[in-house]
Structure formats: C-alpha cells, structure tokens
Amino acid sequence: MQTLQEKASEWSGVSQNDAFAIDDTNLYEKLGHQTFINLSTNFYNRVYDDEEEWFRSIFANSKKEDAIQNQYEFFIQRMGGPPLFSQRRGHPALIGRHRPFPVTHQAAERWLHHMQEALDTTKDIDSDSKTKMMNFFRHTAFFLVAGDELKNPKQAIPCKHAA
Amino acid sequence: MQTLQEKASEWSGVSQNDAFAIDDTNLYEKLGHQTFINLSTNFYNRVYDDEEEWFRSIFANSKKEDAIQNQYEFFIQRMGGPPLFSQRRGHPALIGRHRPFPVTHQAAERWLHHMQEALDTTKDIDSDSKTKMMNFFRHTAFFLVAGDELKNPKQAIPCKHAA
C-alpha cells in the first residue's frame, strides 16, 4: 500500500527531499514577518474573488480574515518563525483540519494556481525561496488529497441509508 | 461548537499555554538526541508489554522498532531538533495518522500512564523539562481524542449495511 508521502510525491511530481528543502534555510528570517502576511492576503484575495464558483464556494463558510491569519501563522511557524499557530490553535493537524473540505486533485491544482500567482506578485520573495515554497506547497497539496481519500476508502462496504 | 483545542484543554486539564510551553526552551538542545531515543524506547517497551490486552492490541499491527523511530523523530522535530520526521514521512498530520486507531479517553489515559513512567525512568530528564513535556503530551493526547470523535459525528444519519 502506498503511503501518504509516496502518493504526494507521485501526484505532485515533487520528491520528499525537494518538498522539505524549506528546512535548509530559515525562510522566516530571510523573508521577514510582513512578507508572510502579504503573501496570504494576496492569496486569499484571489481565492475569494475566483471566477470559478466551485472553488470559491469551498471557502464560503470561512471568514477571509480568519483564513488569512490561519494560513500565515502556519507558514510562519513551519518556516522557522515563532509557533504562532500552535499557541492559538494547537497542532497544525493538516489532514484533520481539512476534513470538512473536498480536497480533490482539481481543487489542489486550483489552490496551487492562485498560490503561484500570489508568490509571483508579492514583493520581496526571491526566486530561490519561491521555488522552495512552491515545491513545499505542491507536495503538501497532494499530501492532503491523499489524506482526503482516506475518508472514503475504496474497500468500504457500501451502505444504504434507511428511507 | 467547541474547537479541537478547547476540547483538548477541557478534557486534559492543561491550558493551551501550558501545553505549548515546550516552545519556550529548545528541549532538543537541552536534553540531547539520545535522550529522545531512550524515552521512546522506554515508552514502547512498556506499551508492547502492557498487561492490559485491549491497549496492547492497538499496536499489534505495528513493528515496535518503527513505532519507536516514528515517535522519537516526531518529538525531536517538534521540540527544536532537525526535521527528521518530515524528511522521512512528510507532515506529522497527527489526527490523520491516528485515524486507524481507536483514540478514546481511556486509551489516552493509558498512553499517558506509560509515558509518565517512561519520563520518570529515563535518565537525564530534569523536572522542569518533564513537566513541560507531560503537559504537551496530555494536551496532545486529548486533542487526538477530539480529532477521533470527528470520525463519528453525532449528527450522522445512521446507516444499515445490506445483509
């Protein structure tokens, strides 16, 4: 049986090593606190304005300000900064916290499309950091697709709801 | 609706602040690499020898050596050391990775019983570090109980399997 990280590598085309090259440098110290806030704001502005209604609707029950803060606090914590996310919300628990959402291959690609544009239009992100972050995001997005599929194991006995 | 971290705090009796006081000092640098290996080895020796068959059986499909390595690599990464866990297995994704296991209140208490004994009998763990780690473990154990309950939401429509 393929592990989560094997599926993530196969589907994303990003090796485990490249995905976690974010740990080779302290990206938080390199880019600075405000850059992470700017990146997440830029990203969610795109998401909440997405012309693709199926994707925009995934976020319909979340406030944009909360989505932005949750994201940049996680990025800051994971990329060498203070543990802001855990202090406020506990473990990242990425698969568990994405359980309410339909994390499909198509949704992963749409998320990554907006993130690439956000990275390209946020100032003060050098190209080496951009490559590292995009590899991390791409691998993580498909790690979550793999995690989402655990919800509906193909081996499950089909079940009929009583009328 | 209570959040995961609110449930974790209520059930564990450990505040969010106390749980993440592990981030106030670099426990990896303070205790050293080998101490984490010793702690996890001590812990799983107890678990795999548990006289309580219901608890021991939760681990029946995992090799002890793998359980030990997965645990100390996660602890090392989370407590200020190199990101060994992610390099090998990807995101910790604690709730997702515990999905196959019955993480009940009773199982959390049994896990914590063995961990307290392991902490008390592993050399070179000073009492301040022990308190911080135990608060983190206690909060995390009940965070996972809260995550486990997401699997069986009470609102779910009951379902009958076809004969």
Image (spheres, coloured by chain):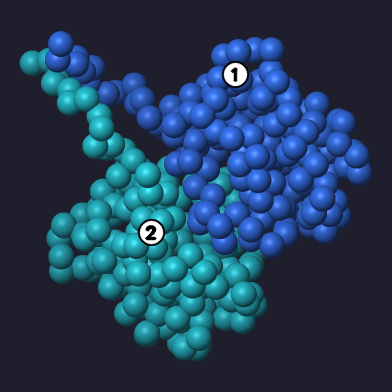
Chain colours: A cyan, B blue
Q: What chain letter is assigned to the residue under label 1?
A: B
Residue A109: x and y in percent read 26, 66
Instruction: Name the foreground residue: A117 vs A15.
Output: A15
Residue lying at 51% horizontally and 82% vertically, measured from the top left = A129
Q: Residues within 10 Å of mark 1 (few under 14, many from 20)?
A: some
Residue B148: x and y in percent read 46, 30
Side of A152 relative to B25 (left or right): left
Instruction: Name the foreground residue: B82 vs A86.
Output: B82
Q: Are marks 1 and 2 in contact (CB under 8 Å)?
A: no
SS at circle 1: helix
Residue B42: x and y in percent read 78, 33
Q: Residues within 10 Å of mark 2 (few under 14, many from 20)?
A: many
Side of B95 relative to B63 (left or right): left
Q: Which mark is residue B161?
A: none
Instruction: Name the foreground residue: A73 vs B133.
Output: B133
Q: What chain letter is assigned to the residue under label 2?
A: A
Residue A62 seen in the figure: no
Task: Identify the image quadrant of the C terminus of chain A.
Answer: top left
- Residue at label 2? A8
Residue lying at 69% horizontally and 18% vertically, measured from the top left = B50
Q: Quadrant of residue B65?
A: top right
Side of B25 relative to A58 (left or right): right
Residue lying at 44% horizontally and 55% vertically, measured from the top left = A5
Residue B107 seen in the figure: yes
- Residue at label 1? B55
Task: Please state which amino acid type lies under the numbered disc 2.
Answer: Ala
For the residues beneath circles 1 and 2, the answer to whether they share a chain is no
Query: Height in image: B35 above or below B157?
Result: below
Residue lying at 72% horizontally and 59% vertically, measured from the top left = B81
Task: Please state which amino acid type lies under the numbered disc 1.
Answer: Phe
Task: Identify the image quadrant of the N terminus of chain A.
Answer: top left
